[in-house]
Image: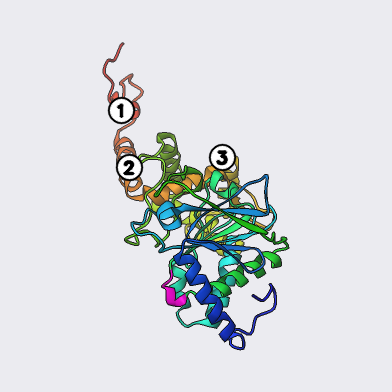
Amino acid sequence: MPGPHEWPDWDQAAEQFETLTREVAARLERGQGLRLGEAGVLSTKVHTLDPAAPREVRIHRHLDAGQFFYGRGQSGEVIHLDIFHEVAQVDQRAVAAAVRRALGRRTSEAPRLLDYLDIQTGVGGGRASGSLIYGRKASLRHSHLNHVHLAVGWPRDHLKLVFTLAWAVETEVARQGFELRKIESLRAEEGPPNGTMDASPYSDYIDSLLKEDGAQQPPAGGSHPDPAEVQSALELAEALGGVEEARSLLEALASRESWSEMKRGFDRRGLRAEDVLENWANRGLVTPDPRGGYRLTETGWRLYDIFRRYGRELELAFRRLMQRLSARAKVKPASFSGARAPATAEWGPVRRVTS
């Protein structure tokens, strides 16, 4: 396969790639892995790298990638491609953009194929056609600091495009200034059929369409949010005038909008961006970005996740909060004659009042 940087003449080498594609298909059918490109490993299985042998990748033949990562019923439906590099924080959005451009030059079906391609790096990930603001759990990002992970759910008649996919990712990693790490050997790891491995370090809420029914994955870690984080979310919504207002401003930070675009979003809501972001920085939600503007901290990402996952519940809680505040505002203040305001005026129902 051609090396990074230079766009290959795919048509001139069409016959060669047809032969390679048939070989790849045969190996995948047998549950085997193979090296691809300069630093890629391809299979339908789970891959791991032993730090003691950094040039050797283990192919866990008893762990199907689609079943392991997405809970699919059938095996062999999801292709797993890892591109290895030096320990680095590879920009997942730039990788997705490079893949989009490369596939766009090869097929008119690129937009549809991007819907069924997931990307994860040491920074984040998600569906290649999406916002790529997911995959932010610390253990997940840490486990991807040495490779770009791609999960491919394309029909097998598009299998030849995995060469373009590997080329695009390798070229983009090199363009970002990181060294590719060539894998020298693969080792098959056997185990019991449908064997198990702890998936928690590799799991997080993402916008993938690779689940069996195309639905989004359920949030990891239970169905109930942390009460303290809900309270913080409601305080933020109250300060900004609504749940949707707070969510959209957090989303602007999560998607790394340009400073001018983000400032316009604040201006439309009658807010001064500098004041709001300084307040958020004091609360530990954002931190200055060396490239300009601000970016979310881990606390900010968790709060944004609360808005994404529990938007409806937050809306209901916010309405109840506004109703209580409105009711309090209607209570007449105590007069100077010594009369007291009702016990519920500020503190809610009181079981016992002492003189």
Q: Is residue 65 left or right of residue 288?
A: left
Q: Quadrant of residue 173?
A: bottom right
- The residue lying toward the viewer, choosing from 219 and 343, is 219
Q: Nearer the viewer, mark 2 or mark 1?
A: 2
Q: Earlier in the sequence, mark 2 or mark 1?
A: 2
Tell me the residue at 67%/51% (across/down): 54
Q: Nearer the viewer, residue 48 or 89?
A: 48
Residue annotated with mark 2: 317
Q: Position of residue 295 (x, y in %)?
A: 60, 52
Dot label at residue 348 = 1
Tell me the element at label 1.
Answer: loop
Question: Type of residue at label 1?
Answer: Gly
Q: Of discs 1 and 3, which sits in the foreground? A: 3
In the image, residue 265 sits, relative to residue 336, either above or below, namely: below
Q: Magenta stretch: residue 156 in it?
A: yes
- Label 2's element? helix
Give the amino acid type for the residue marked by disc 3 in the picture.
Arg
Task: Say whether marks 1 and 3 touch (CB < 8 Å).
Answer: no
Q: How many marks?
A: 3
The mark found on residue 283 in the picture is: 3
Report the front residue among 83 and 221.
83
Classed neighbour count for the residue bearing mark 2: other residues with Cα under 10 Å, few (<14), some (14–19), many (≥20)? some
Amino acid type, mark 2:
Ala
- Per the image, label 3 sits on a secondary structure element best described as loop
Instruction: Measure how far apart labels 2 and 1 are at the Cα level.
Output: 16 Å
**Magenta-drawn segment:** 154-158
Tell me the distance, in whole angstroms, between the alpha carbons under discs 1 and 3.
28 Å
